[in-house]
Image (cartoon, rainbow, N blue to C red):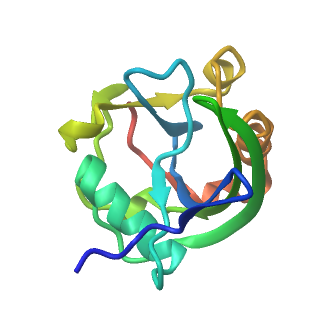
């Protein structure tokens, strides 16, 4: 039986919980977007009932781009308030660091399509300069990623010796 996502409406506000992964490679971050959207975000998806956020990001990345990894590290939890397609949202985002050295099947092409065809997802490795000039959602995510790219500890999750 498929588990239900943590996604419900309360007082006309949609509440959902999402897990996303930060994968850095040679000072680039992997981003995703649906073909129909005009903004990019981190790869991930909705957390299902009784599913840990780290399990969600493992499941979503396997479904969307075919990668496997054993573990990830909690990086941050953020709240996001926004309006999308005439619906007001209150979203909880669990952000995880994924070490690319522990990932199997990671595509290192600059840009590529997801394998889950019904979602029509696109993926792109973005540099700091590209992040600055690209529409990123949620709005605070750009600053969060730029801080991460410039942090002293980023080398712990940086893929060594592989160029895109």
| Front-lying residue, 17 or 112 | 17
Question: How many numbered discs?
Answer: 0
Left or right: 78, with 126 as reference point:
right
Residue that protrudes farthest toward the front in the picture: 11
Of the 4 image quadrants, the one containing the N terminus is bottom left
Using the rendered view, name the quadrant where residue 29 is placed.
top right
Using the rendered view, name the quadrant where residue 69 is placed.
bottom left
Question: Is 157 placed above or below 36 here?
Answer: below
> Whole-percent x and y of residue 62?
27, 59
Question: Is 159 placed above or below 115 here?
Answer: below
Residue at the image position 80 percent from the left and 37 percent from the top: 143
Residue at the image position 50 percent from the left and 80 percent from the top: 52
Left or right: 108, with 55 as reference point:
left
Residue at the image position 29 percent from the left and 48 percent from the top: 64
> Whole-percent x and y of residue 40?
55, 29
| Front-lying residue, 98 or 44 | 44
> Whole-percent x and y of residue 158?
54, 52
Using the rendered view, name the quadrant where residue 116 is placed.
top left
Residue at the image position 29 percent from the left and 29 percent from the top: 112
Question: Is 123 placed above or below 157 here?
Answer: above
> Whole-percent x and y of residue 157?
56, 59
Of the 4 image quadrants, the one containing the C terminus is top left
Residue that protrudes farthest toward the top in the picture: 133
| Front-lying residue, 23 or 142 | 142
Question: Is 104 placed above or below 141 here?
Answer: below
């Amino acid at each position: 039986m498929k588990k239900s996502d943590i996604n419900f409406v309360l007082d006309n506000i949609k509440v959902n919980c999402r897990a996303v992964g930060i994968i850095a490679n040679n000072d680039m971050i992997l981003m995703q977007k649906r073909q129909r959207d005009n903004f990019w975000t981190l790869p991930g998806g909705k957390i299902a009932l009784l599913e840990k956020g780290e399990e969600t990001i493992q499941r979503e990345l396997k479904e969307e781009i075919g990668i496997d990894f054993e573990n990830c590290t909690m990086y941050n939890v953020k709240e996001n308030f926004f309006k999308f397609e005439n619906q007001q949202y209150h979203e909880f985002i669990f952000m995880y660091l994924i070490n690319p050295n522990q990932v199997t099947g990671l595509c290192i092409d600059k840009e590529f399509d997801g394998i889950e065809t019904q979602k029509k997802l696109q993926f792109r490795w973005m540099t700091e300069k590209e992040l600055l000039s690209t529409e990123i959602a949620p709005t605070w995510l750009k600053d969060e990623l730029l801080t991460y790219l410039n942090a002293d500890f980023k080398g712990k999750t940086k893929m060594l010796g592989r160029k895109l």
